[in-house]
Image: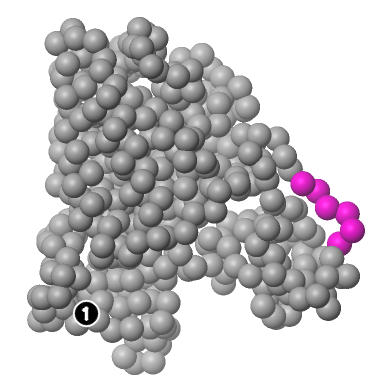
């Protein structure tokens, strides 16, 4: 795996460079969270005001020939595998629009959910782990997400919540593949990552069922017992033909933490395999947004803020930054309130500007249901009806104002198929 990112002093920036990371959080700056090409000197001046250095992707630089001689002669390139902030070799492009991929994604979500349930049920009955069904479903899920990650993320967000413990693994796997796609991991690595995350909870089949379903906070003894699921899972996988060492390492290390505070072995830093670091972040994000029964879930933006606070301690600084860029503060399917007071559901991302996605408006500024829902693209619709700047002001908890994203999803599908009453505004 090769890296293409370079650390640049802001004084050495020139027009055409592609900025992928700041030395401070993207939130609170006027720049898009996922990176941008420098087009004007004013942007360089603004960067100078906010930052001391930034990171640029040399493979995405588009520097005019007249300016190439101004490039800095001395560059620092971080290249330690698993510890750098850099992107990998593959560059995925969206090859299928969400309106065409959404049906496939919905079917695959159901397929992989059923496969995971079958695997776990068999293990609980004392039968050996059979990989074929779950691996086949995981590989097809990778194919869907590499074609268009928004479709599966949307389905993952709007599907009815299932109390079954192992739905957690399915959702976490979706986040992991989307994250790995953003990083440019190879297809083979994405398949390994997907299967590894789906199998992270197999050890819980050896735990008492009441431990998994009891609402509220666990006792100290319960937590100690719960942590044994990692070693149980590794034991199961080591006895299973066809399981690679990479998949076992994901399961064994996904609860390890960058500062050594994790379990079961207290690994830290680059002692933790890179794919296990990804698994750890997505597992924690999923736990924050879909916790145990009777534990208040965080909104997507709250969970991202929580992860942001854990940079450099529980999680490696740059891997958190990349995850936020990959998933966005407001993933597809999130209920949001706009600065106009209107409320809607994010139905599609704008990869160029993830803070300005496509939103299906459901309520007006007085929180009254709209007679005809409108779909607006915040990348193009920058002003409200009063001429004021239109932004997302905050994300709302799932179920806010009795909004069901699944119904919004179905209504939007009707529009995609050429019928229904939605009106697009572009």
**Residue 228 appears in the figure:** no
Asked if residue 310 lies left or right of residue 159, the reply is right
The picture quadrant where one finds residue 65 is bottom right
Q: Which residue is mark 1?
A: 374
Q: Is residue 273 above or below residue 359?
A: above
Taking the magenta stretch, the answer to whether it contains residue 32 is no
The picture quadrant where one finds residue 350 is bottom left
Q: How many numbered dots are placed on residues in this image?
A: 1
- The part of the chain drawn in magenta is 72-77
The colour scheme is one colour
**Residue 69 appears in the figure:** yes
182 and 401: which is toward the camera: 182
Tell me which secondary structure the magenta stretch mostly adopts.
Answer: loop
Rendered location of residue 110, percent (x, y): 18, 41
Rendered location of residue 109, percent (x, y): 22, 43
Q: Is residue 33 above or below residue 386?
A: above
307 and 236: which is toward the camera: 236
- Residue at x 41% of width, y 43% of height: 177
Rendered location of residue 228, percent (x, y): 35, 12
Rendered location of residue 406, percent (x, y): 15, 57
- Residue at x 39% of width, y 27% of height: 196
């Amino acid at each position: 795996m090769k890296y293409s990112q370079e650390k640049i002093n802001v004084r050495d920036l020139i027009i055409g460079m592609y900025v992928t990371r700041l030395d401070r959080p993207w939130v609170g700056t006027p720049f898009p969270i996922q990176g941008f090409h420098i087009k004007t000197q004013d942007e360089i001046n603004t960067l100078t005001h906010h930052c001391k250095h930034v990171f640029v992707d040399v493979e995405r630089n588009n520097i005019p020939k007249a300016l190439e001689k101004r490039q800095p002669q001395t560059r620092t390139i971080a290249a330690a595998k698993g510890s750098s902030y850099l992107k990998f070799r593959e560059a995925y492009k969206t090859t299928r629009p969400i309106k065409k991929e959404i049906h496939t994604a919905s079917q695959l979500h159901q397929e992989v959910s059923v496969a995971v349930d079958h695997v776990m049920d068999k293990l609980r009955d004392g039968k050996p782990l059979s990989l074929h069904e779950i691996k086949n479903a995981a590989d097809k899920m990778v194919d869907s997400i590499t074609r268009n990650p928004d479709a599966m993320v949307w389905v993952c967000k709007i599907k009815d919540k299932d109390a079954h413990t192992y739905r957690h693994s399915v959702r976490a796997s979706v986040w992991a593949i989307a994250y790995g796609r953003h990083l440019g991991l190879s297809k083979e690595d994405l398949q390994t990552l997907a299967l590894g995350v789906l199998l992270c909870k197999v050890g819980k089949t050896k735990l008492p069922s009441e431990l998994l379903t009891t609402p509220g906070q666990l006792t100290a003894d319960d937590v100690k017992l719960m942590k044994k699921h990692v070693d149980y899972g590794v034991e199961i996988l080591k006895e299973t033909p066809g399981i690679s060492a990479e998949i076992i390492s994901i399961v064994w290390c996904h609860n390890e933490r960058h500062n050594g505070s994790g379990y079961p072995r207290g690994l830290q830093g680059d002692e933790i395999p890179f794919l296990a670091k990804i698994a750890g972040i997505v597992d924690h994000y999923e736990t924050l947004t879909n916790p145990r029964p009777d534990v208040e879930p965080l909104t997507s933006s709250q969970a991202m803020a929580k992860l942001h606070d854990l940079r450099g301690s529980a999680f490696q600084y740059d891997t958190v930054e990349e995850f936020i860029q990959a998933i966005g503060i407001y993933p597809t399917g999130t209920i949001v309130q706009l600065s106009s007071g209107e409320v809607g559901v994010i139905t599609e991302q704008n990869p160029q500007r993830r803070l300005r996605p496509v939103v299906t408006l459901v309520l007006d500024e007085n929180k009254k249901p709209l007679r005809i829902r409108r779909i607006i693209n915040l990348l193009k619709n920058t002003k409200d009806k009063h001429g004021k700047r239109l932004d997302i002001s905050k994300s709302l908890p799932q179920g806010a104002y009795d909004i069901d994203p699944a119904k919004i999803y179905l209504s939007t599908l009707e529009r995609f198929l050429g019928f229904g009453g939605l009106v697009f505004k572009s």
